[in-house]
Image (tube, grey):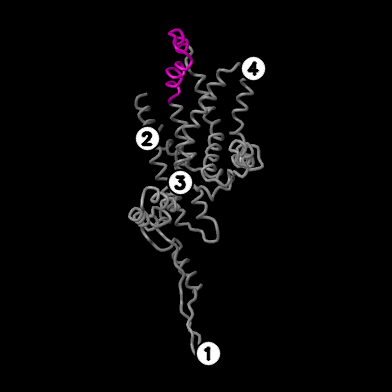
């Protein structure tokens, strides 16, 4: 293929990447180094029969003119990254110096919005991702071992949480854990406390959000692993049986090594998906108990005062966190590619 033909095929993709990825990223980077202009204040002196008084007010015309002349705002460098809304260097140093113990220090850190959001996001990601892989693999093994007559209905039931719209699925679970719902009433009966409410307890709300995350994402892992199981060599499995391997040993030493590239793939997708957890927090109305990086950005962009610069800073810090999180998986994928 000559260069001209190659460029003809590649040019539309390059143009789309420039418009949809490169330019927005550059815009977000620029916004993160700026802050909104402060309002132009003026002192107005009003004189009357009893003397003169001075009042301070906002000069709307000059404020508007300043914002139109410099729409990005004023350049502040890394101030948006180090202020209280994000990395909070001064607040972290103050907390370290004045805390009486680890518990006191942790309480102060969790009062900082960015750290509170990243703690929940990482907790959600590191708990939901492995449990999703394990549950999806277990379902795939069970369905693959079932008789052909019931395999179809089992696959349909297993895929049901993935088919349902995330918002609808989370709302259904939200109603079920209500004090008047099936799960909420059952939890009250098990705890022996009729006043127990999942929605009023922060730990229980975190657990419920993670249960929903596993329930919703497990079908994706199931589909991938079930497809991978169809390519497992029957000769290797039968050879292991002849050698006396039991069911668990065949799964451990034959099946799992065969589908390990798929495990890496599912882990990569789930890490990215779980790190941007958003819908369950909104559907469960759980902002009082938990906030993720996505809802933190959403809150900056909502309301009457849209904090675009703060949202841009949080977005870039989120991208940085995702890069750090995916680095080990990408290194493993690269090594597998080099060995292949």
Instruction: Please give left or right for residue 191 compared with residue 326 in the image.
Output: right
- Within the magenta stretch, is there residue 54? no
Q: Which residue is mark 4?
A: 149
- Within the magenta stretch, is there residue 236? yes
Image coordinates for residue 202, horizontal then vertical, percent: 52, 46
Image quadrant where one finds the N terminus:
top left
Q: Residues within 10 Å of mark 2 (few under 14, many from 20)?
A: few
Does residue 254 appear in this view?
Answer: yes
Image coordinates for residue 76, horizontal then vertical, percent: 37, 61
Q: Which residues are magenta?
A: 235-260
The residue mark sitting in front, 3 or 2, is 2
Q: Residues within 10 Å of mark 4 (few under 14, many from 20)?
A: few
Instruction: Please give left or right for residue 280 compared with residue 314 in the image.
Output: right
| Residue at 52% in and 61% down | 305
Q: Which residue is mark 3?
A: 21
The Cα atoms of the two marked residues, 4 and 2, are separated by 42 Å
Instruction: Pick the residue in front: 176 or 35.
Output: 176
- Label disc, if present, on residue 328 of the rendered structure: 2
The Cα atoms of the two marked residues, 4 and 1, are separated by 95 Å
Q: Which residue is mark 1?
A: 48
The residue mark sitting in front, 1 or 3, is 1
């Amino acid at each position: 293929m000559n260069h001209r033909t190659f460029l003809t095929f590649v040019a539309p993709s390059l143009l789309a990447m420039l418009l949809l990825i490169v330019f927005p990223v550059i815009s977000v980077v620029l916004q993160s180094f700026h802050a909104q202009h402060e309002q132009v204040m003026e002192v107005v002196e009003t004189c009357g029969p009893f003397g003169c008084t001075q009042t301070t007010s906002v000069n709307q015309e000059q404020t508007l003119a300043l914002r139109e002349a410099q729409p990005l705002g004023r350049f502040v460098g890394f101030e948006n990254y180090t202020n209280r809304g994000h990395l909070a260097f001064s607040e972290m140093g103050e907390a370290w110096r004045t805390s009486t113990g680890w518990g006191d220090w942790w309480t102060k850190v969790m009062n900082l919005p960015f750290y509170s959001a990243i703690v929940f996001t990482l907790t959600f990601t590191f708990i939901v991702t492995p449990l999703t892989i394990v549950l999806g693999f277990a379902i795939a093994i069970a369905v693959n071992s079932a008789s052909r007559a019931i395999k179809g209905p089992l696959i349909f039931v297993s895929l049901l949480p993935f088919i349902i719209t995330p918002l609808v699925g989370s709302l259904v679970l939200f109603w079920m854990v209500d004090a008047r719902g099936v799960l909420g009433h059952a939890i009250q009966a098990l705890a022996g406390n009729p006043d127990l409410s999942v929605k009023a307890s922060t730990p229980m709300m975190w657990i419920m959000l993670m249960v929903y995350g596993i329930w919703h994402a497990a079908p994706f892992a199931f589909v991938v692993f079930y497809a991978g199981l169809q390519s497992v060599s029957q000769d290797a499995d039968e050879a292991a049986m002849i050698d006396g391997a039991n069911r668990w040993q065949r799964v451990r030493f034959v099946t799992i090594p065969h589908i390990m590239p798929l495990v890496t793939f599912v882990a990569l997708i789930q890490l990215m998906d779980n790190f941007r957890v958003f819908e369950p927090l909104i559907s469960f109305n759980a902002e009082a108990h938990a906030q993720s990086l996505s809802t933190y950005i959403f809150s900056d962009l909502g309301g009457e005062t849209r904090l675009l610069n703060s949202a841009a800073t949080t977005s870039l810090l989120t991208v940085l966190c995702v890069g750090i999180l995916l680095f080990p998986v990408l290194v493993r994928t690269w090594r597998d590619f080099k060995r292949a």
